[in-house]
Image: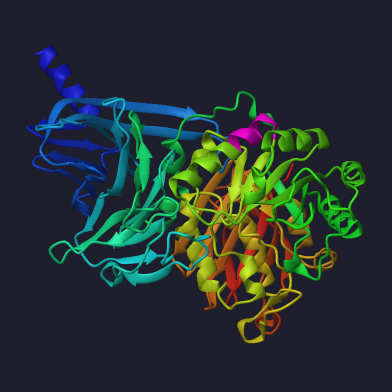
């Protein structure tokens, strides 16, 4: 009897049932279930509390000069396990992250010639499912060329989704995530990730990928199977190849990135998820204490007629020093004309004296970052350049205009980050593809763009309040985004104009809230020094952080509004923003510890509806359990910090 009871307990613990060639594995809390069936083909499906998230969907591969792989597979072995750990991130939204899942490992072999082997691993977390395919060592001399990875995502109904259409695989990934039906996705579209889906009133999901190594970036394409609402993976073609050409070249052993399905009962649960980082390897930097996140000033053309001159750089160093920010970013043309045959990232433009600049920055307790064009990175000797920057005391490098995530470019990213780490340099990629959680392994990769960000206010009408309220639930799910917030020339929509100096849509309080809501450990503030000094909100930008000990989404609806609370030490920050409609929200402060807090808040007023730069700064006493009322103008926001009283 004891043996039988022990077996039953063990079976429940692993939450896995084997019935022939059908397998099931559930999340530790029992709410999410992944089912895998190995029959003539490989099928998987996902459920959340008996709601169908992913209907039975195929996993297979096609190759150049080799038969397709995924049919007539036999199960050689299956393994079940559970994993539970607490780890401390360097680039943190939480002081500690729990990595807890149940897993299923399947070893498969083709029944007929050439009898290739593959392994499938499914990990089921409380916040989603991740799975990948591994090609174990076999046929050592053979070079495989994947032409398509046909991992499908079949949905039961024509769900609402928020999907970005890049239209091409050569892209800076700077496009809106539009609300549409899955059935409205056409074969011509190239859908980027993450893609967020409203499966049910109590079930939201997002598809993305993680741990991309020596592989091509993943997109989604329409796959009309039996008139179902189906999407399939589409890999970025190798350089010079057509859309139906070569995607990934490899020899075994090799593995795909993790295909991730984030799941929660509300949109905010997706925002709080750490599944993308959890499936990446632990930190490989032996001593990462030199990775120091923070806010940065930026001498960019966006904020005015900024020239690459020594006096201008000093002006922005002074801004960083005045605000208490640790960094100042020296942007393009510091080494002269870029992307030219003789462009050398080790030679400073003749009008600049770099030793004097860096000495001045050091006297102000500020460190500098340097911009560079991607083709200039390995033009000569990147190791030599990084060694020089370390000698100068440079904090990090910003690299721009890659505009691709084909296999070669993915490998290029990793080479850059690993080389930079050897010389204690942080990295910010612009013109970049989405994050994949690799910052857990190499936390010197502090942020990247790959987002339709603030700079588009300079020449377009695309940075709308709706767009700003969509980003946390879509692009930000993949990881940090260098949106470059902080525009203080706030305008109501009817008064907004493009040009120089650049204006931004939305109110001052909305701008401040972005520093709380948007994730970016290296947070670059975009505006000119004169627009910050003495303006309402300056105090907030002196106080706000870029990494956090705790993160909570208090409410939110995709493209409509969001409120987040973040903790740094014993100080809490709250940010809230709304779309183009005025909104009133009640926020319960049940996340505070016991005792009284002083809340310094920045709110919209009736006058803000006429002048978006107006925000009311107040100080009030609050405590745990209090409810505060937030009133936001169209395109408005709310921002506050709360410090415990001693």
Residue sticking out furthest to the left:
20
In front of the other: 458 or 611:
458
Name the residue furthest top: 2
Residue 588 appears in the picture as rendered: no
Examine the rendered structure and indicate whether residue 312 appears above or below residue 28.
Answer: below
Q: Nearer the viewer, residue 361 or 537?
A: 361
Please name the residue shown 37% across and 63% down the image.
Answer: 190
In the rendered image, residue 534, in percent from the top left (x then y), is placed at 85, 66
**Residue 133 sits in which quadrant?**
top left
Spot the residue most to the front.
341
Q: Which secondary structure type mostly characterizes the magenta part of the structure? A: helix
Magenta span includes 22: no
Q: Quadrant of the C terminus?
A: top right
Task: Find the magenta span and give its range.
Answer: 417-424
Query: Residue 199: which quarter of the image?
Result: bottom left
Magenta segment includes 422: yes
Q: Is residue 611 left or right of residue 448?
A: right
Q: Of residues 301 and 292, which is closer to you in this image?
A: 301
The x, y position of residue 608, in whole percent, is 68, 79
Q: Residue at x 43, y 43 (%)?
A: 276
What is the x, y in percent for residue 513? 63, 61
Q: Is residue 276 left or right of residue 532?
A: left
Residue 218's place in the image compared with 634, above or below, is: above
- Give the total number of marks visible in the rendering: 0
> In the displayed structure, would residue 547 be above or below residue 173?
above
């Amino acid at each position: 009897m004891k043996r039988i009871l022990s077996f039953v307990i063990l079976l429940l613990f692993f939450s896995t049932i084997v019935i022939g060639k059908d397998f099931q594995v559930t999340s530790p809390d029992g709410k999410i279930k992944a089912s895998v069936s190995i029959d003539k083909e490989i099928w998987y499906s996902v459920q959340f509390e008996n709601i169908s998230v992913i209907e039975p969907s195929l996993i297979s591969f096609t190759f150049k000069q080799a038969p397709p792989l995924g049919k007539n597979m036999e199960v050689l072995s299956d393994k079940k396990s559970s994993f539970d750990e607490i780890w401390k991130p360097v680039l943190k939204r939480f002081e500690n992250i729990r990595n807890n899942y149940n897993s299923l490992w399947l070893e498969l072999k083709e029944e007929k010639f050439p009898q290739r082997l593959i392994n499938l691993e499914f990990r089921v977390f409380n916040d989603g499912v991740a799975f990948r395919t591994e090609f174990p060592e076999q046929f050592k001399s053979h070079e495989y060329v994947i032409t398509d990875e046909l991992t499908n995502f079949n949905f039961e109904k024509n769900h609402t989704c928020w999907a970005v259409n890049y239209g091409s695989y050569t892209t800076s990934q700077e496009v809106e995530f539009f609300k549409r039906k899955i059935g409205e996705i056409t074969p011509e579209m190239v859908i980027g990730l993450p893609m967020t889906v409203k499966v049910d009133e109590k079930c939201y999901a997002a598809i993305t990928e993680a741990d991309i190594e020596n592989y091509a970036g993943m997109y989604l394409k329409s796959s009309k199977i039996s008139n179902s609402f189906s999407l399939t993976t589409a890999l970025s073609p190798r350089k010079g190849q057509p859309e139906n050409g070569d995607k990934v070249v490899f020899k075994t052993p090799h593995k795909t990135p993790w295909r991730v399905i984030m799941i929660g009962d509300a949109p905010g649960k997706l925002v709080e998820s750490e599944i993308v980082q959890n499936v990446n390897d632990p930190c490989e930097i032996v001593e990462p204490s030199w990775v120091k996140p923070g806010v940065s000033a930026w001498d960019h053309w966006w904020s005015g007629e900024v020239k690459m001159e020594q006096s201008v750089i000093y002006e922005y160093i002074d801004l960083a020093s005045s605000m208490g920010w640790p960094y100042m970013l020296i942007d393009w043309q510091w080494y002269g004309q870029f992307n030219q045959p003789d462009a050398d990232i080790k030679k400073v433009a003749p009008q600049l004296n770099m030793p004097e600049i860096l000495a001045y920055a050091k006297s102000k307790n500020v460190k500098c970052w340097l911009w560079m064009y991607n083709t200039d990175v390995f033009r000569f000797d990147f190791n030599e350049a990084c060694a020089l920057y370390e000698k100068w005391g440079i904090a990090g490098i910003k690299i721009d205009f890659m505009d691709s995530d084909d296999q070669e470019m993915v490998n290029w990213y990793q080479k850059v980050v690993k080389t930079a780490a050897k010389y204690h340099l942080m990295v910010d990629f612009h013109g970049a593809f989405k994050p994949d959680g690799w910052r857990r392994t190499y936390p010197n990769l502090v942020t990247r763009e790959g987002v339709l960000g603030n700079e588009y206010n300079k020449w377009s009408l695309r940075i709308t309040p709706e767009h700003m309220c969509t980003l946390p639930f879509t692009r930000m799910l993949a990881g940090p985004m260098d949106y470059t917030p902080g525009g203080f020339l706030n305008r109501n929509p009817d008064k907004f104009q493009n040009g120089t100096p650049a204006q931004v849509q939305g109110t001052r309080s909305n701008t401040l809230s972005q520093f709380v809501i948007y994730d970016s450990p290296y947070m670059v503030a975009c505006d000119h020094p004169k627009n910050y000094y003495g303006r309402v909100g300056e105090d907030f930008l002196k106080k706000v952080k870029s990494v956090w000990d705790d993160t909570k989404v208090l409410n939110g609806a995709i493209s409509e509004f969001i409120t987040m609370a973040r903790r740094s030490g014993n100080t809490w920050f709250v940010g809230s923003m709304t779309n183009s409609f005025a909104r009133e929200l009640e926020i319960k402060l049940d996340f505070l510890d016991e005792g009284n807090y002083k809340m310094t808040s920045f709110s919209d007023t009736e006058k803000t509806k006429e002048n978006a730069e107006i925000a009311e700064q107040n100080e009030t006493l609050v405590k745990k359990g209090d409810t505060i009322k937030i009133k936001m103008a169209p395109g408005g926001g709310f921002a506050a910090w709360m410090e415990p009283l001693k």
